[in-house]
Image (cartoon, rainbow, N blue to C red):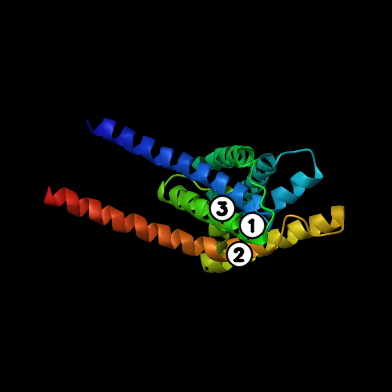
Amino acid sequence: MAGATDQKSVFTRYSTLILGLFFMGLGISLITKSYLGTSPISSVPYVLCLVFPVTFGEFAFLLGVFFLLIEIIILGKGFPKIQSLQVFVGLILGFFIDLGMLIFYFVDPVFYPAKIITLLAGCVVLALGVYLEITSGTFVYPGDAVVRIIAEKAGKRFGTVKVAFDTTLCFTAGAISFFFFGTLKGLGEGTLISALIVGYIITAISALFVFFSHRRNHFQRDN
């Protein structure tokens, strides 16, 4: 009986991870479709897909592999081998990004208010995905894992390192864009807005889940 319960728990956790990655892919796609700039973590893959005949999601996967290699270099022998499975997280997220770009093929906002609405919708969906990814208690995208490792090694706050990390990605994407196009593509005010508000939306979603969880538990006790 206990074994069946454990198997159900594992199934639930990994199902939550897959669902989280699905929403993350959709959120990144929506933010990108706002034409106000993509999210910081996807800025380099998006600019590269404009340059080379490789999809947005495939470059996101390759970047995830690069981040995983950085984790291995930093931790050396201390790198938990089980965390090598992060490569599949990157693969699945890359697939969902491409799927999201297909699903939202019709999204083509022309007026600025429509672009803002699309951007904010993408931020909410992305935040929900990140929340589910984290609460699954399994694996995270290598880009988030490497930030956590750097923060621990440097003795800095996660948020501080995250800001520096995202800023570096945006500057890299900008440099690639200027090199190939002579102008800035894939980055804009939407990049900054998503970087600033997604964290707060995750906090709000977490509070909502806690609230409804408490309400459900209270209802079950009363019945």
Report the amino acid beneath label 1: Lys
Spatial CA span between label 3 and label 2? 11 Å
Q: Secondary structure at mark 1?
A: helix
Q: Residues within 10 Å of mark 2 (few under 14, many from 20)?
A: some
**Residue that appears at 61% across and 42% down:** 104
Q: Report whether 121 appears left or right of 168.
A: left
Neighbour class for label 3 at 10 Å: few (<14), some, many (≥20)? many
Q: Which mark is residue 115?
A: 1
Residue 98 figure quarter: top right
Q: Position of residue 185 (x, y in %)?
A: 77, 56
Look at the numbered discs 3 and 2 and tell me whether their residues touch, using CB distance below 8 Å.
no
For the N terminus, the image quarter is top left
Q: Provide the residue designation for mark 2.
A: 193
In the image, what residue type sits under mark 3? Gly
Question: Is residue 77 placed above or below 160 in the rendered structure?
Answer: above
Front-most of residues 73 and 216: 216
Q: Residue at x 18, y 51 (%)?
A: 219
Q: Which mark is residue 122?
A: 3
